Amino acid sequence: MRIPLHLAVVVALQTLALVAMVAMKQWTLQTGTPVLLKTEPVDPRSLFRGDYVILNYAINDLAQGTLAGDDDFERHDPIHVLLREDTPYWQPVSLHRERPEVPPGHVAIKGEVLYSGSMMVDGAPSITVRFGIENYFVPEGEGRALEQPAEDEEISILVAVDRRGNAGIKAVLVNGEVRYQERLF
Amino acid sequence: MWDRAFLNRLRRELPAWVEQGWVAADGQAAILDHAAARAERQTRLVPVALAVMGVLVFGAGVITFFAANWDAMAKPLKLALLFGGMWGAYAVAARGLARQALGARVLGQALTLLGVILFGANIMLIAQIYHIDSHYPNGVLLWALGALAVAYALPVQVVAVAGLALAMLWSGMEIGDFERLLHWPFLVVWALFLVPILGRSWRIGAAAAMLALSVWCLMTFILWSYDREGEQIFLLQVYLLAAMAFLVLGAALESQPAVAALSVVVRRFALVGVLLSAHGLVYDDLYGLRRLQDPELSWGTERLASAPYPWIVATVIALALAVGLAAWQVRRHGSGRVDGFERIGLALLAALGVLMLVNLFLPAGYGAVAALYVAVNLIVFAGLVWLIVAGYRAGDRFQVNAAFAFFAFGMLALYFNHFWTLMDRSLFFMGGGALLFVGGYLLERQRRRLIGQIGAAGEEGGAP
């Protein structure tokens, strides 16, 4: 019976691919350095679209001239942003085309330049970077509480950054309290 | 259904035809047996088609039900449903494909396709469950690779077609959303799909592959027209040479019994590619002529001083490939003697090749570029006439029709390109109308005459 055997191999490959997607994400979450990032929704009313959150971090828009490291990034360039631990949120230190040396108390998060020079940040032309942590799916309706946070509520995101620079969302925090936590099951 | 009606009509009419002596008496039984077998095959396909539709509708219902209750489910249940659905579809497909009955095999193919669809749905849903927010075209690429694995493992043509459509979608996202000027990884995936298509001589798969390649070329050309308009002309040249190479490859397939059925598909797509690329060479703005003529012009393509180095390499490689393949094909199957008509074709090809090379290095001066443009146009239109005659000689109606159509498009393009600026507006419209009426009539009359002669020659069994 060659067909069932061939099909079994294909199904095994497809299953492995799906499992690998989950495993790689879990590896990042389990082994990565926890990094607290501030979200800055440009328009809080559009924070949620349908059943997923669009998260806009302070480190999404970076001023090229005011940060150390490389500059002249163009659209779709890969980029590594060195972040330094600070209180309460981690802060960008420098921009790099290649993965930099990471001193203690720092992480290098990997991303892709979405736009270059289209905005000004701190009086310098900025780049918009995507790190793959900008969307977070939430149960239907439960996101309403976060959609329009009260004036005294501050939303922050706990992200894990692994040693290759990949990032994943570990938890969504409201005023420092965990509201959603990412688990395998 | 139609074959059943045809069989009933034959049963009514045949006795009278036998009586008239139009059909031999022993032929009556043979005809009825043949028609009955066809009707029987069709009758068996009806429940199969209904079953396939049933599977798809049931699947849609299940997906909708779970989508409506998705949030209420725990992660393990969600994962069990996702993996269980995919494994179940493939398990039932395996049983169907392993059987000899036509209905079971068709059902097996439909469920294999369902398995591939569910694999794609699983990629998206697992990404949602675990907040995997990566470069999103990669999800479609993974889906296409899943379909590729199925196409390698199983004789299910529809999966190869679906996989090529997914590869095209993936590349379209990279080109359209991420502005990849030359998304060459598509060509790797595309070539991987060719292995099962050629190995199993899948005709529809071959058409899907050629269509996917054509759409990719078109998407790439459109992006270049926005980003690097001065280099469009060099891209067109490479397309033309590559399409010629495919034309030769298509002809070569004809002599290989295992893949001979694919020859006509490849040749037709390649011919349209040659005609479309050659048609592009008719437009003067691609050469930068408008801005060379009027440097104050704020629009139009700017002529580059010379082609960037990669274009020189690409053109030379494509030219060598087209010429090399043609020479190989002539040596393999030619009689060694080239007649006068074939010599004209070769001379036109050689002249076009030389002009393409000249175009790479021509300085940006109006006189020289205009001379090149006129020479290319003369050769393109002479080439179209040559293709019409060649199609007529070979009894190839598709070639005659396609070449006639592009000859007419080319003439119209030239008219609207040039005479607008040279003639008074009223004369322009009158002339255009007359060209459409008279030219269209003459071309259509000539085309019908040639097609009629090809048809007559075909019925007589001789060459036209």
Image (cartoon, coloured by chain):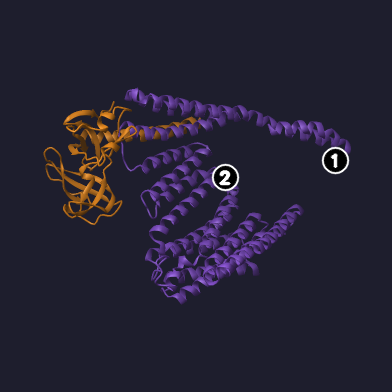
Chain colours: A orange, B purple
Q: Nearer the viewer, residue B333 or B152?
A: B152
Give x and y (percent) for residue B328.
54, 61
Q: Secondary structure at mark 2?
A: helix
Q: Give the mark nearer the N terminus: 1 vs 2.
A: 1
Report, in whole angstroms, how far the alpha carbon at label 1 lies from the one at label 2: 38 Å
Instruction: Kindly identify the residue that appears in the image at 41 percent across and 45 percent down.
Output: B170
Q: How many marks?
A: 2
* Letter of the chain that mark 2 sits on in the rendering: B
Discs 1, 2: same chain: yes
10 Å neighbourhood of mark 1: few (<14), some, or many (≥20)? few
Q: Is residue A74 left or right of residue B242?
A: left
**Tags 1 and 2 touching, CB below 8 Å:** no
Circle 1 chain: B
**Residue B205 coordinates in the image, percent (x, y):** 53, 44
| Three-letter residue code for mark 1 | Trp
**The image quarter in which residue A29 lies:** top left
Look at the image and tell me in which quarter the C terminus of chain B lies: bottom right
Judge whether A33 appears above or below A64 on screen: above
Above/below status of B427 relative to B262: below
Is B411 on the left-hand or right-hand side of B220? right
Give SS at disc 1: loop
Q: Which residue is mark 1?
A: B22
Residue located beneath label 2 in the image:
B203
Residue visible at 70% across and 60% down in the picture: B445
Vertical comparison of A134 with B379: above or below? above
List x then y, in percent, for residue B126.
35, 32
Farthest bottom residue?
Answer: B367
Query: If the image is split into quadrants, where does the N terminus of chain B sit?
Result: top right
